[in-house]
Image (cartoon, helix red, strand yellow):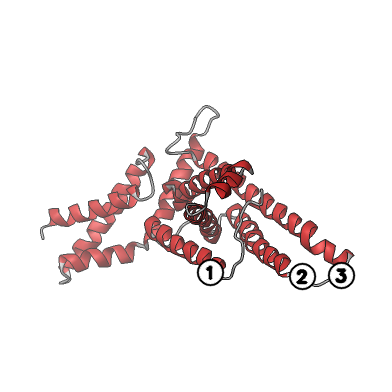
Amino acid sequence: MSGGNRMKRIDVYVDDLVESVYDRQPDELEAFKQEVKSRLNQAAQSLQAQGYSVEDSIQIAIQRFGARDTIIQEMENRYEAHANADVDGNAEGDGDDPKPAAQQLVMKGVSALHLLWGIWILAIALINLIIPKFVQPSAFTPGELNALLSYIPPIGLFILSGIGLWKKQKWGMELSLFIYLTMFVLQVWRIITISGWNGDQLQFFFREGYIVEMIVSILLAVAGVWLMMHKRVYAWFNPDMARMKTFVSYLIIAVLYIVVFQMLRINVNFFFL
């Protein structure tokens, strides 16, 4: 493989790396891209001179330069530094490529919503199940125990994910993705279930407004997954895995979560509307 082909391979690697983070390449990263390409090419050329094959020289050069998430973080740092230097009160973010300040504001808002919702579910559990047991001590009935078990996971998930998002922790993003995927899988499960209902059951479902809850849940789930999987948002949390691998992994976990809870006959509800 000639030097030109080697450089082409490196160009493709760096270009794909940028495209995996941004919907469109910010102009601010062009100089950084050229710097990375030049350093990788020089390192690979030196390794070839030492007797390594072209393929091995490229792989070793990439490994020595830095892990994928390290390069992504450096891209983010350079972009944010440039964007913050240019902020003068007149710049407006693009819907597909939001400015870092707007991105942080959105994530803080989502974090606050998660915390508030977790606290709200905790309050419902205390009022409906815990406090009455202190006022009039008695054992939990099977129905009350089922309800209590259905409250605990969303309380923990929403509060922990809210804290994680607020602190810009990778696990906060992953917990949030799990929540939204679980919400979506749950609604798919409900659709499959009600497809076997008779006319009277369906009329009750629509009359009591459960169809509205289902639609709202699906819309929120889709919006949440889209937000957590957005290239810029995902890269903001410095993840270890590619977006699609993360998505598939947590989708499988969400499906298993719903299946296990259904097998245990425990209600799964993330909204308690």
Q: Residues within 10 Å of mark 2 (few under 14, many from 20)?
A: few
Q: Position of residue 193 (x, y in %)?
A: 50, 56
Instruction: Report helix, strand or loop for mark 1.
Output: helix
Of the two numbered discs 1 and 2 on the same chain, state the one appearing first in sequence: 2
Front-most of residues 265 and 205: 205
Q: CA distance from mark 3 to mark 1?
A: 31 Å
Front-most of residues 218 and 264: 264
Q: Is residue 148 above or below residue 110?
A: below
Q: Is residue 121 left or right of residue 69?
A: right
Front-most of residues 214 and 194: 194
Identify which residue is drawn at 56% across, 67% down: 261
Q: Amino acid at mark 3?
A: Pro
Residue 137 disc label: 3
Q: Is residue 23 above or below residue 122?
A: above
The part of the image, by quadrant, that contains residue 45 is bottom left
What residue is shown with label 1? Answer: 260
What residue is shown with label 2? Answer: 140
